[in-house]
Image (cartoon, helix red, strand yellow):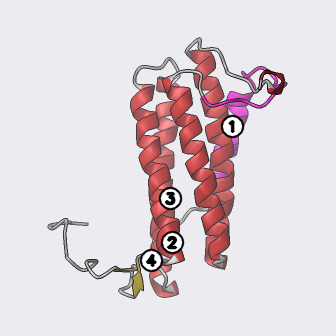
Amino acid sequence: MRIDKVYTRGGDQGETSLIGGARVPKSDARIECYGTVDEVNATLGLVRTSLRDSTAGPHLSPIIHRVQQELFNFGAELAAGDPEWLAKLPRVEPRHIEQLERDIDAINDDLPKLKSFVLPGGGWASSYFHLARTVCRRAERLVVALGDPAAATGVQYLNRLSDALFVFGRWAALQDGEPEPLWEPEKT
């Protein structure tokens, strides 16, 4: 792939092209979906940057890099409204979900059992994981609302990814020696 020009002026009137050439309004639900998946990916860029200074970085950074690649594939899936084009693209597959489950299980075994809900915090890396988790949940809701049967595996992937980001955030706090903030309803 070669990108020579960043701007095309093709979207100046509020429309954009899907993969395959179909033109849709920028407010189209499909655009909102892959834009939010892109936002998850950008937030994971913050995660990876924060992991440079985290004890959890050497273990989690390669996982997050892999996830960013997978999310880009899913964004491309969502951007391809045409089944013929969709067939040519790399896809999020059940094996990617299974790998996330293995990642979650391996890390979750090291964590203390929860007795309350976790509040976002626990150091920079943990906080960014929680931010990415919330954006991921929004992406999941939007893709579910899209109702595209071709995105069913992607919905499962986003669901598992948000679980993984929660676990990774907890583990990053633990590895960095940061206290994990817990919800204490009696203190409100």
Q: Which residues are magenta?
A: 96-120
Chain-order first, disc 4 or disc 2: 2
Task: State the residue at coordinates (47%, 33%).
Answer: 61
Check the image and name the residue furthest to the top. 177
Tell me the residue at 65%/65% (across/down): 153
Q: Which residue in the structure is indicated by mark 2?
A: 78
Q: Earlier in the sequence, mark 3 or mark 1?
A: 3
- Going from N to C along the chain, the mark reached first, 3 or 2, is 3
In this image, 181 relative to 33: left or right?
right
Q: Which residue lies under the disc numbered 1?
A: 104
Q: Which residue is mark 4?
A: 88
Q: Alpha-carbon distance for marks 4 and 2?
A: 13 Å
Q: CA distance from mark 4 to mark 3?
A: 20 Å
Q: Are marks 4 and 2 in contact (CB under 8 Å)?
A: no
Residue 8 quadrant: bottom left
Q: Earlier in the sequence, mark 4 or mark 3?
A: 3
Kindly indicate the quadrant of the structure image that contains residue 164.
top right
| Frontmost residue, 136 versus 95 | 136
Q: Which mark is residue 37?
A: 3
Q: Is residue 120 above or below residue 144?
A: above
Label 2, label 1: how far apart the Cα atoms are: 26 Å
